[in-house]
């Protein structure tokens, strides 16, 4: 399932471009709009808190999944195992990182780390 957020956010002021990954065309947006930055962070935190328990081991996978799903129109499996297989077993995440604003993604990762420390 392609990210609906990707499709809806076409007017971010930064043109999406197409890259090739694994023989497929993937559209990449270099920047997320501010509202979607908040959604990214909330999604990462939601993935790390289950039944009132903090599970920081899911943070990296959640960051990778949100990066791919929010910055691109690529699809990921719905299961965590399927996502982990693609996000850790291929270079999709690294390829996407090469085509997005590193400062923005670094700021999102830093914010997630601060939130995680506050949750523990």
Image (cartoon, rainbow, N blue to C red):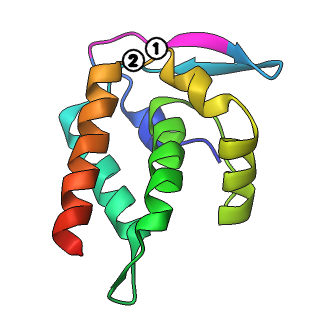
Which type of secondary structure does the marked residue at label 2 adopt?
loop
Does the magenta-highlighted stretch encompass residue 18? Answer: yes
Does the magenta-highlighted stretch encompass residue 97? Answer: no
Checking the image for residue 30, the label placed there is 2
> Image quarter for residue 91?
top right
Pointer 1: what residue? 16
- Residue 64 visible, this orientation: yes
- Residue 79 visible, this orientation: no
Foreground residue among 14 and 81: 81
- Assess whether mark 2 and mark 1 are in contact (beta carbons under 8 angstroms): yes
Residue 67's x, y, as percent?
Answer: 47, 38
Residue 77's x, y, as percent?
Answer: 71, 54
Residue 1's x, y, as percent?
Answer: 65, 48
Q: Nearer the viewer, mark 1 or mark 2?
A: 2
> Image quarter for residue 10?
top left
Residue drawn at (53%, 29%) of the image: 72
Magenta residues span 13-19
- The quadrant of the rendering that contains the C terminus is bottom left
Residue drawn at (67%, 61%) of the image: 78
Q: Earlier in the sequence, mark 1 or mark 2?
A: 1
């Amino acid at each position: 399932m392609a990210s609906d957020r990707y499709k809806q956010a076409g007017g971010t002021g930064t043109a999406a471009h197409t890259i090739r990954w694994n023989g497929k065309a993937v559209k990449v947006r270099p920047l997320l709009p501010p509202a979607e930055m908040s959604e990214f962070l909330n999604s990462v935190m939601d993935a790390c808190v289950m039944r009132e328990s903090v599970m920081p081991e899911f943070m990296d996978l959640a960051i990778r999944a949100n990066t791919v799903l929010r910055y691109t129109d690529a699809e990921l499996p719905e299961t965590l195992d399927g996502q982990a297989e693609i996000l850790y077993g291929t270079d999709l995440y690294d390829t996407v990182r090469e085509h997005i604003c590193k400062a923005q993604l670094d700021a999102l990762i830093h914010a997630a780390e601060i939130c995680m420390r506050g949750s523990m």
